[in-house]
Amino acid sequence: MASKKTGLMDKWKAEDKPVKIDKWDCSALKNALDDAAKSYEKNQYTVMTENFGFKEEHRLMDLRLLICTVAVGFSLFALVWDYIRPFPESRPILIICVLSYFMLMGVLTLYTTYMEQNIFLVASDKDKAGLEPDDKWELASTLKKYTHLYKLKMTFTNGKTGLSRSEEIERPVNNYFDEDGTLLFKLFEPEVRTLQGRIAAASKKE
């Protein structure tokens, strides 16, 4: 079993390519670190709980995409309707579509603020026997504009008890990138491992 895990880990590391970004681009920095944390988390649990059905969930992202799609749909419908029935005949429909679009943008803002909360990975760890509810893992991060501090938060929710445990770190982004903007994964990986270790240690005390 150990050799199988080692083989999978080696294959994963061999297939990874260095990530190089513009180190002055805040969004690129955050996305690179998020992807690195996500890759580590998914790989770690795919290897360790391969037989338990660890699976990434996309409901948070799918709902956001649905809201955006409906909003764009109203915009496109307004354009088509105005083409078929030029203004001022199209005025009532245009008003409805514009109001609907801005209403959905408000819904999207509330959704990303209070529901997504910067979460970029949600995954379930299924019980091997299929008798217990799924455990859930979440990863969330923040990197505010004009700051250099990257905050990574990991949350584990026990499917059986419903209890959640969270751990987070906050580090300067230059800890993980060289002068050329290449992500130093070997320096970032231990940080993610530390979060998992703290959660595992807390669970043993319960």
Image (spheres, helix red, strand yellow):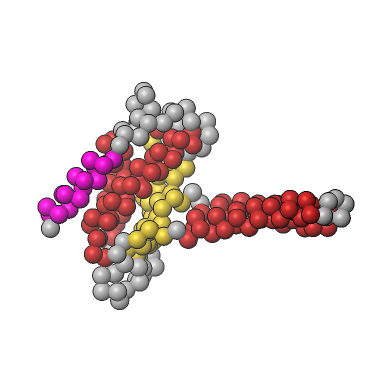
Percent coordinates x, y for residue 58 in the rendering:
45, 58
Circle count:
0
Q: Is 205 drawn above or below residue 127 in the view shown?
A: above
Asked if residue 104 is among those painted magenta in the image, a careful observer would answer no
As drawn, is 133 to the left or to the right of 79? left
The quadrant holding residue 21 is: top left
- Please give left or right for residue 50 compared with residue 140 in the image: left
Judge by depth and name the residue closer to the eye, 83 or 48. 83
Q: Is residue 166 above or below residue 33?
A: below
Residue drawn at (37%, 24%), measured in percent from left and top?
Answer: 180
Residue 96 placement: quadrant: bottom right
Q: Position of residue 66 (x, y in %)?
A: 57, 58
Judge left or right: residue 54 versus residue 112. Answer: left
In the image, farthest residue toward the right: 88
Q: Is residue 9 magenta?
A: yes
Inspect this view and state whether residue 99 appears.
Answer: no
Q: Is residue 164 above or below residue 133?
A: above
Residue at (35%, 42%) from the top-left corner? 36
Which residues make up the magenta segment? 2-16
The percent position of residue 93, horizontal first and vertical second, equals 79, 58
**Percent position of residue 95, x then y:** 80, 54
Residue that extends furthest to the bottom in the rendered view of this protein: 131
Q: Quadrant of the C terminus?
A: bottom left
- Please state which of residues 64 and 75 is positioned toward the viewer in this rendering: 75
Q: Magenta segment, principal secondary structure?
A: helix
If the image is split into quadrants, where does the N terminus sit? bottom left
Kindly indicate the quadrant of the structure image that contains residue 23.
top left
Q: Is residue 49 visible?
A: yes
Residue in the picture at 15% in, 54% down = 4
Q: Residue at x 38, y 58 (%)?
A: 56
